[in-house]
């Protein structure tokens, strides 16, 4: 059996909540990413990407539950041969209440719940409803992970259509019965 000795500071670093995108730790990680090196799904699958794969998934995450955690786990592990940096976006209350309806938890409570999921590397507060090319470039996002069922809104038959058409979409499986 191999024994690993952790210093208290190493242990604390492993056990702290994920940073918000505005925190120095997240900014440093983003700045260190050479986004000019475009990552293909094939590179990510084969483990030949020259850097971490930056995967983004978004949602409301009200009453954070095992289905949410399972989605994040799938996104974090979608490319088992590559190192994945998982970014979670959550919409604020104003946008959520306008586009989807009321929530039980406030946006700050939802953000804080997400930060403590072990699969999460970074949180984007006040995430947009629709992902744009500019948003992907700002956060240096390589792929967007969601379940493959089209997300229909009043003005769109699939919120992730553009992402899918551009080849930036990776599918997770929805947890049934939740």
Image (cartoon, rainbow, N blue to C red):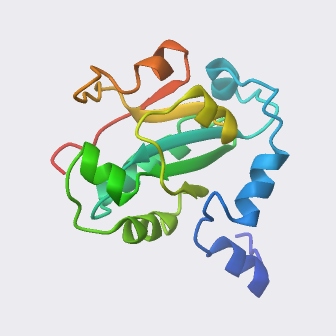
Residue 104 locus on image (x, y percent): 22, 67
Residue 39 percent coordinates (x, y): 71, 25
Q: Quadrant where the N terminus lies?
A: bottom right
13 left or right of 131 in image = right
Residue at image point 53% right, 36% down: 78
Residue at the image point whose x is 19% and y is 51% from the top: 178
Residue found at the far top of this picture: 165
Quadrant of res 124: bottom right
Q: Residue furthest bottom?
A: 8
Residue 24 showing in the rendered view: yes
Identity of the residue drawn at 45% across and 49% down: 72
Q: State the residue lying farthest toward the left.
A: 177
Measured as percent of width and height from the top left, residue 93 is found at 34, 59
Vertical placement of residue 176 versus 43, above or below = below
Q: Is residue 82 left or right of residue 173?
A: right
User: Quadrant of the rendered structure where residue 49 is?
Assistant: top right
Query: In the shown orientation, is residue 62 left or right of residue 116?
Result: left
Residue 140 visible to the viewer: no
Give me the residue at 65% from left, 40% from top. 54
Question: Number of marks in the image?
Answer: 0
Residue placed most toward the observer, 122 or 67? 122
Image position, residue 177 (x, y; %): 15, 47
């Amino acid at each position: 059996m191999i024994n690993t000795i952790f210093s208290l500071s190493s242990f604390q670093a492993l056990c702290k909540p994920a940073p918000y995108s505005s925190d120095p730790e997240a900014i440093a990680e983003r700045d260190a990413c050479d986004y000019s090196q475009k990552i293909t799904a094939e590179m990510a699958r084969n483990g030949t990407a020259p850097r971490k794969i930056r995967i983004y998934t978004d949602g409301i995450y009200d009453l954070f539950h095992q289905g949410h955690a399972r989605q994040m786990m799938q996104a974090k592990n979608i490319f088992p041969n590559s190192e994945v940096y998982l970014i979670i976006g959550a919409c604020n209350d104003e946008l959520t209440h306008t586009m989807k309806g009321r929530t039980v938890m406030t946006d700050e409570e939802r953000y804080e719940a997400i930060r403590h999921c072990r699969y999460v590397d970074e949180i984007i507060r006040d995430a947009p409803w629709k992902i744009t090319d500019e948003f992907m470039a700002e956060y240096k996002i390589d792929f967007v992970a969601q379940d493959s069922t089209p997300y229909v809104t009043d003005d769109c038959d699939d919120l992730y259509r553009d992402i899918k058409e551009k080849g930036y979409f990776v599918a997770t499986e929805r947890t049934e019965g939740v």
